[in-house]
Amino acid sequence: MKGRLGRVGVRFPKDTPCSETHVIVTKQGGGAAGAFYGSGQLDLLPGAYTVSISGKKVAAVNIAARNSSTIATGVLHINAAKGTHTEVLDDDHKTTLVGGYGEQQIGLPVGSYFVKVAGQSEAVEIKKDQVTEF
């Protein structure tokens, strides 16, 4: 990279593009800097940003001039019937990050989550560049 801008990127495995995964980038303490669906990148002024992927916030992402920062992500592949409602909960086991019906491929930052189905939940671990089957 050249010039004064830095870059933040979010990439999901090529076989699972997560085209419905919403990514929002905000300046820490300020407003929206940009948003996209699926894998993507934004050029930004240097500073600290928060990157939200499927509702899960990654705080204090530092962007430096002429440097690129990539958020470590993986994919949760939920294998459920069309009429089955599922929710992905944060590691606090309370906060709903995203929900939907049927089979889904959800991009998430690396970490621990819970999947809730029919009032019950089970822990899942999202690993870098991997697809976790549920």
Image (tube, rainbow, N blue to C red):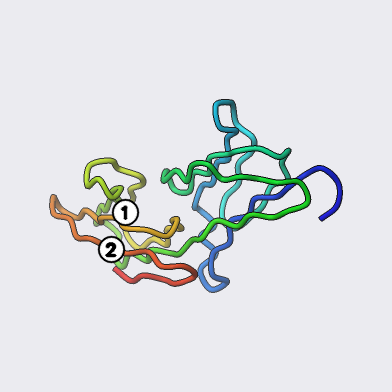
Image quarter hosting the C terminus: bottom left
Left or right? Give the position of 85 relative to 57: left
Q: Residue at x 48, y 48 (%)?
A: 53
Image coordinates for residue 94, horizontal then vertical, percent: 22, 42
Q: Residue at x 42, y 71 (%)?
A: 131
On the image, numbered disc 1 is attached to which residue? 101
Image height check: is 24 above or below 76?
A: above
Decide which of tag 1 and tag 2 comes sooner along the chain: 1
Q: Residue at x 63, y 54 (%)?
A: 69
Q: Which mark is residue 124?
A: 2
Whether pointer 1 and pointer 2 mark residues with C-beta atoms closer than 8 Å, the reply is no
> Mark 2 is on which residue type?
Val
Q: Amino acid at mark 1?
A: Tyr
Q: Work out whether 81 lies above or below 23.
A: below
Answer with left or right where residue 44 lies relative to residue 73. right
Q: Quadrant of residue 9?
A: bottom right
Callout 1: SS: strand
Mark 2 burial class by Cα count in 10 Å: few <14, some 14-19, many 20+ = some
